[in-house]
Image (tube, rainbow, N blue to C red):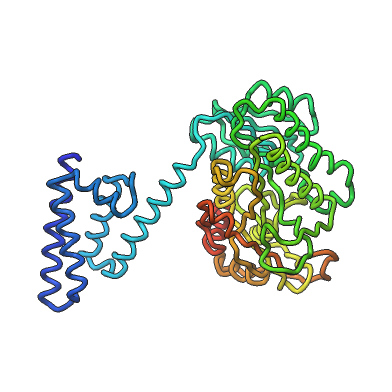
Amino acid sequence: MTLTLRIVLLIGSFLTTYYVARKVRKGQIKIDHSLFWVLFSLFLLVTSIFPDYLKIITKFIGVYSLSNMVFLIVIFVLLIKLFLNSISLSKLEGKIESIVQEIALKELEDEKMIKNSKILVTGGAGFIGSTLANTLLRNDNQVTVIDDLSMGDFANLNEASNLTKIEATITDKDLLKQVITENDFEYIFHLGAVASVADSVARPYETHEVNFDSTMTILEILRENKNSLKRFVFSSSAAVYGDEPTLPKKEESVIRPLTPYAIDKFASEKMAMIYNNLYDIPTSATRFFNVYGPKQNPKSPYSGFISILLDRLKNNTELTIFGDGEQSRDFVFIEDVIQALILIATSDQSRGQVYNVGTGKRTSLNDLIHQTENFASKKMSISYGEAREGDIKISVSDISKLEGIGYQPNFDLKEGLKKYLEYELGK
């Protein structure tokens, strides 16, 4: 511990003692609160003199690799705010607790982060794929992206020396074999797909080649060349549940796919599990609910409702709702999806398993529009049309299985929508 930090702690100790004594004398602090602050003052004093005790204390509260410098400086800044009466005592206590929780969560995420690995991301120029690739690029990983750019854009990817971009279709078996065998990937995230339900209905065979055959091709290549592979993660969809009415949707819920897209997704995830069980290829699968966030293309026919909503808001054009707007969805922010993908890829418990990726909470389209208007301080033009045949009224996930391996959504709809709006309106 540096001399500067010791001085900061020592001053903090004296300031805390002085503050508590003054408040107790005026009857402005209860005895139980004064005891808390006296103990905190002693903590600062002791750690300034005996820095090794700090390691013992941080281990005791369960934050084993807590950054001593950052944590204590933040606490000291909060104390100054308290002295300036810009923050209440109860709020300060709450902030200290939340800081500890946030740092502990960040450390847990860092432990699970993939580092110094060779990674393949199919569909890596798209919305989810590019966000995942950009996240993985930060940790000295060698990331290879394959995308045919039918809906993705390499501009979504950060320029980096550890990134390889390949413009190609995932139906090209020879190319897949060459790329996978030459690179000996440790992680493969298979997100490439024709993600339009309507397109799968109009072109069932062509979309089947992308959505199912490509999965089989990769799994077969891995059966012969799985040398360094730690995990193959297949991205499926909540569409596999279809119109089965039981809510919330659990991984063991009845599967009732209604379209070629949903059938291909379900068949692919089942095949991935079979290759795990029969051929010892480490696989996992995810069922995404309604993902939203920056870089989602509102002009894509595959795009989610929120990106279309924000596009209409920015351009002052009318938004059409099919039905009464009371249909509800489980909207999950992109950063939580990336957290889930990396967690599933690195957890021993997740091997051979399928996981819902959502928030476990549902929101109606009308409520979503209302929240967006409040954030933007702007009224939208809305029209309501006839409900589309086959549209599901309510969709919401049960994420208890994913939570069982450490997943915790960091964004509720309010927080995620605010961040997305700031990104879109700030362009």
- The answer to whether residue 91 is seen in the rendering is yes
Q: Position of residue 237 (x, y in %)?
A: 71, 52
Viewer-closest of 310 and 361: 361
**Residue extending furthest front?**
278
Viewer-closest of 316 and 179: 179
Q: Give above or below for 71 relative to 225.
A: below
Left or right of residue 271: residue 416: left
Point out the image quarter for the N terminus. Answer: top left
Which image quadrant for residue 187?
top right
Q: Position of residue 188 (x, y in %)?
A: 64, 35
- The answer to whether residue 152 is seen in the rendering is no
Viewer-closest of 343 and 97: 343
Which image quadrant for residue 36?
bottom left
Q: Give above or below for 354 relative to 326.
A: above
**How many labels were placed on the picture?**
0
**Residue extending furthest bottom?**
27
Q: Residue at x 74, y 49 (%)?
A: 300
Left or right of residue 415: residue 276: right
Viewer-closest of 137 and 360: 360
Q: Residue at x 78, y 24 (%)?
A: 174
Left or right of residue 153: residue 403: left
Q: Give above or below for 248 relative to 345.
A: below
Q: Position of residue 79 (x, y in %)?
A: 23, 60
Q: Residue at x 79, y 50 (%)?
A: 196
Left or right of residue 420: residue 392: right
Q: Position of residue 345 (x, y in %)?
A: 58, 41
